[in-house]
Image: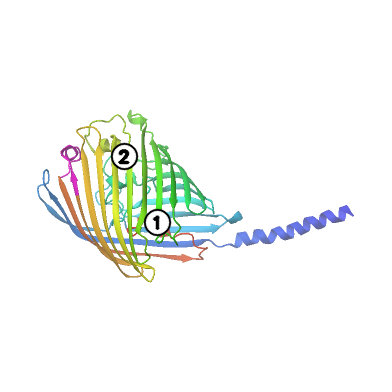
């Protein structure tokens, strides 16, 4: 009896398993294409000491990006995939015409995210409502002490290994190891040595309640950088920030966001160039006040003011500040028109180190269009455009 029963159980098990395997093999991956187009035209004006009082007309399409994501449903309810993204960098960067700012593989589940490859660094905990994410970079992001110059992408992108735990859909604890390169494209593909380590703890209100609740988000982060190859001790920074709704109204929303970053420095007391400012003991911070008008639950108009301050503890207490005011109006689905005015002032010691004028004014009119298109879409978790900077955060 037993000899007859065992073959029957084996055949029954195989009959159950084969359809499951066939179903898994027949699952078609989701393919998503995303485009974030940003064009601006305006003028840049230098005034005061070291300026020459000159004005220059500028047409800028930097930060325009093309994104491609593939995802597939795996066993145990998790999903895997990859993202590849191209971006047009700033005109004065050393990256060439285009830059691969995203090139990573990921796993995502209900309680975790794992990411390996090229992506955004953990250089801030709050997003600010500026046209481009590098408009206030000196105040809103931790500065990379291994950067070799003024290319802003040095402080924004790198090769990352990042694991994030998710609790109750609101609490996020992540640990990361990163390779921050001197300049992407300059031997960036030849050396992937990890030189930055850190963690981030944050709370983010769920999207359905983020405009009606009081607290939108709050977070803190710590980063350690290994710059010993340049004869410097380890450099670290700590940051804390958050945003709250002053008027939590779904139609007329007013929020305020604040972030501060302390950098312990690496025994670098003299400011001589851009690199020395990244390695000096400093404190930098930013604050923004934003009004958002929504019609039919869709963002229609935004007005915002963002201010930033950076102060260096040595070399005469060099400092810098900047203010940016902007407004955007939606002309339709994912198409916005806007304008921004920004002014920046550097102290005398900082001007000597960076070669910048005393005052820099930047006025720009902006057109922005973004869209995404998915084939075989899986249940949606987030938009691929969320990997890019959101001037309506």
Q: In this view, does 89 lie above or below 186?
A: below
Q: Is mark 2 on a helix, strand or loop?
A: loop
- Place residue 55 in its image quadrant: bottom left
**Front-most of residues 386 and 74:** 386
As drawn, the label of residue 214 is 1
Q: Position of residue 82 (x, y in %)?
A: 47, 54
Q: Which of marks 2 and 1 is in front?
A: 1
- The residue that appears at 15% across and 45% down in the rendered structure is 358
Is 119 positioned to the left or the right of 88 in the image? right
Q: Tell me the quadrant of the picture where the N terminus can be found.
A: bottom right
Q: In this view, does 153 lie above or below 382?
A: above
Q: Position of residue 295 (x, y in %)?
A: 35, 70
Determine if the magenta segment contains residue 348: yes
The span shown in magenta is: 344-357
As drawn, the label of residue 15 is none
Local packing at callout 1 (Cα closer than 10 Å; few below 14, some 14-19, many 20+) is: some
- Place residue 193 in its image quadrant: top left
* Mark positioned earlier in the residue sequence (2 or 1): 2
Q: Tell me the quadrant of the picture where the C terminus can be found.
A: bottom left
Local packing at callout 2 (Cα closer than 10 Å; few below 14, some 14-19, many 20+) is: many
Q: Is mark 1 on a helix, strand or loop?
A: loop
Is 129 positioned to the left or the right of 54 in the image? right
Q: In this view, does 182 lie above or below 268?
A: below
**Disc 2 from disc 1: Cα separation:** 38 Å
As drawn, the label of residue 147 is 2
**Front-most of residues 195 and 302:** 302
- The residue that appears at 28% across and 37% down in the rendered structure is 282
Q: Where is residue 265 in the image (x, y as percent from the top left)?
A: 31, 33
Q: Is residue 78 visible?
A: yes
* Count of all numbered marks drawn on residues in the image: 2
């Amino acid at each position: 009896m037993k000899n007859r029963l065992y073959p029957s159980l084996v055949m029954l098990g195989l009959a159950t398993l084969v359809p499951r395997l066939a179903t898994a093999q027949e699952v078609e991956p989701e393919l998503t294409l995303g485009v974030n187009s940003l064009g601006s035209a305006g003028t840049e004006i230098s005034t005061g000491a070291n300026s020459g009082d000159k004005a220059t007309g500028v047409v800028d399409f930097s930060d325009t990006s093309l994104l491609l994501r593939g995802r597939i449903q795996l066993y145990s309810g998790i999903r895997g995939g990859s993202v590849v993204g191209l971006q047009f960098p700033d005109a004065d960067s050393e990256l060439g015409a285009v830059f691969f700012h995203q090139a990573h593989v990921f796993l995502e589940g209900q309680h975790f995210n794992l990411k390996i490859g090229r992506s955004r660094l953990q250089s801030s905990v709050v997003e600010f409502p500026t046209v481009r994410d590098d408009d206030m970079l000196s105040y809103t992001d931790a500065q990379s002490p291994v950067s070799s110059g003024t290319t802003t992408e040095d402080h924004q992108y790198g090769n990352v290994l990042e694991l994030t735990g998710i609790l109750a859909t609101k609490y996020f604890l992540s640990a990361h190891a990163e390779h921050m390169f001197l300049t992407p494209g300059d031997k960036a593909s030849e050396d992937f040595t990890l030189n930055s380590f850190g963690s981030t703890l944050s709370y983010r209100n769920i999207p359905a309640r983020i405009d009606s609740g009081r607290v939108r988000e709050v977070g803190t982060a710590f980063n350690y950088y290994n710059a010993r190859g340049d004869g410097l001790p380890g450099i670290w920074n700590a940051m804390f920030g958050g945003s709250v709704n002053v008027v939590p109204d779904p139609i007329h929303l007013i929020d305020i966001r604040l972030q501060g970053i302390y950098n312990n420095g690496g025994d670098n007391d003299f400011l001589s160039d851009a690199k020395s400012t990244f390695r000096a003991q400093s404190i930098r911070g930013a604050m923004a006040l934003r009004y958002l008008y929504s019609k039919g639950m869709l963002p229609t108009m935004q007005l915002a003011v963002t201010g930033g301050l950076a102060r260096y503890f040595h070399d005469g207490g060099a400092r810098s500040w900047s203010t940016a005011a902007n407004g955007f109006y939606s002309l339709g689905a994912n198409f916005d028109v806007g304008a921004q005015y920004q002014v920046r002032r550097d102290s005398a010691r900082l001007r000597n180190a960076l070669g910048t004028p005393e005052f820099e004014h930047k006025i720009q009119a902006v057109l922005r269009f973004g869209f995404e298109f998915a084939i075989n879409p899986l249940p949606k978790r987030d938009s691929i455009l969320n990997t890019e900077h959101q001037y309506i955060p």
